[in-house]
Image (cartoon, grey):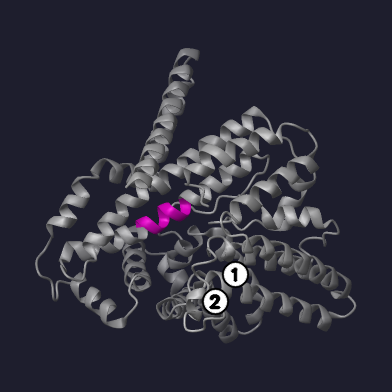
Amino acid sequence: MSYSDMLFFLGLLPLSILFSFFDRSTEYKNLILIITSVIFFSWAKPLAVCLIFVTVIAEYFIAIGIAKNRETNKSTAKALLAADVVMNAAVLFIFAHNYLFDAISLLSFSQAVLPIGVAYYTLRGFSYCYDVYTGRCAVEKNIFCLLTYMASYHFMIAGPLVRYGDIEPYIRKRTMSGREINEGLNIFIIGLGKAVLLAPVFESIKLAGLNSDEITLFGSWLGIIAFFGEAYFILAGMSDMARGLGKMNGFDYPKNYKDPSSKGLITGLLESFNTTVVRFFEEVFSGLGKGKKTLAAGSIVLCFVCLMIWYEARLNFLIVGIVIGIIVALERCVYGKKLEEFPGIVKLIYVFIVSVAVFGGLYFSSMYGYGKWLQSLIGIGNDYQLSVAVRDAVLNNIVLIAIAFVSVCPFIRKPLFTQVDKYSEKSARAYGQVRICKTVALAAILLLCVITQAASLVG
């Protein structure tokens, strides 16, 4: 099941919110959350439920062992943390990257278990034991509280990565009111619109522009930009929906995607995309290179290699991880400070060209296809400038493309919203008009999402 499934946002979600109001106690709300999460995570996949309970029990006892030994016997604590890494890595590769075992019939069951959510689930489990090891949070003695954290469907699909120490106060005591539900629903609908309405637009441009049978100059550029746009709006949309779901249930989660910009160069761009996960990986690997510049650079490369493998255990992701790790290491240790002194337009060109050239490799599974695409970017091997398919994909969706552009450009969006806020402050009537317009807009987005999803089911 996914956040964008009608069965979820028109069925399971409203029912879970409704049942949560039957009792004021936080323990009862946690129970409803766990039941909803198990249904969500294991829909038509009962094996996933067994995975949840087995690994939660393991995380519970491993963390207790780490807490008992972290001060008196550090070698034992490290061994337990290493065991937790091995366990979560095994779950990640077997359930989320099961395509690696297609040739082994005993382990190959990619059609039986959905990988959705497993990557974040395993990272969440390791982050808890890691935080207990580093002293960032206290060990949890109540396994019911830990289960609430581990099984919560809010951040199961696309994050954010919420650390246990940050969420523990909400697990023990939180309130749900009409205001939180309203704010959460607004965030959820906006995220739903990104994933259901905007992402498919960029998918159509991507497929038309990166069609190997019809290579064009503008198609190569627009296709790869659309590839980034599709990934951004799917993941950012899912993350927004997760924040909205949390808000409706009395939780407050951090934003996981920031506005893309040239600030911070490639390092800043990476941290704007899946921020909580990138920062956690950097935190874990930062301790490996303390003291020596060479070790620090090596730990940065290793960090981004592991991060890319966490996304996808494929050769092109591994290569991109190595390249981007080297670039980040060079920015931090060699030329980053000097480049930051250049004008904004120079930094923007640098970030754009490097990110397109490097991250474009994530789309192509072979070096031949990647090399052919790189050549087409500078006009080599093109059939012509622009194909009819790319032109139609852009023109037929020009309104949604404009909306998407405004949504990711703060220099347009922020002044626009500022003017709207100023107008709403003029009078009670103006405030009411703005509120009505916002409500109508959100209702329209929700209706369009329902129609789109219904059409895809019929189709």
* Secondary-structure class at tag 2: helix
Q: Residues within 10 Å of mark 2 (few under 14, many from 20)?
A: some
Q: Which residues are magenta?
A: 229-236
Specify whether residue 455 is painted magenta: no
Residue at 85% of width from left, 72% of height from top? 65
Q: Position of residue 8 (x, y in %)?
A: 53, 44
> What count of labels does the image hold?
2
Say whether marks 1 and 2 touch (CB < 8 Å).
yes
Q: CA distance from mark 1 to mark 2?
A: 8 Å
Judging by the rendered image, the residue that carries numbered circle 2 is 306
Specify whether residue 230 is painted magenta: yes
Specify the amino acid type for callout 1: Phe
Residue at 61% of width from left, 58% of height from top? 161
Residue at 48% of width from left, 19% of height from top? 431
Q: Is residue 24 above or below residue 428?
A: below
Judging by the rendered image, the residue that carries numbered circle 1 is 281
Q: Residues within 10 Å of mark 1 (few under 14, many from 20)?
A: some
1 or 2: mark nearer the eye: 2
- Indicate which disc, 1 or 2, sits on the residue closer to the N terminus: 1
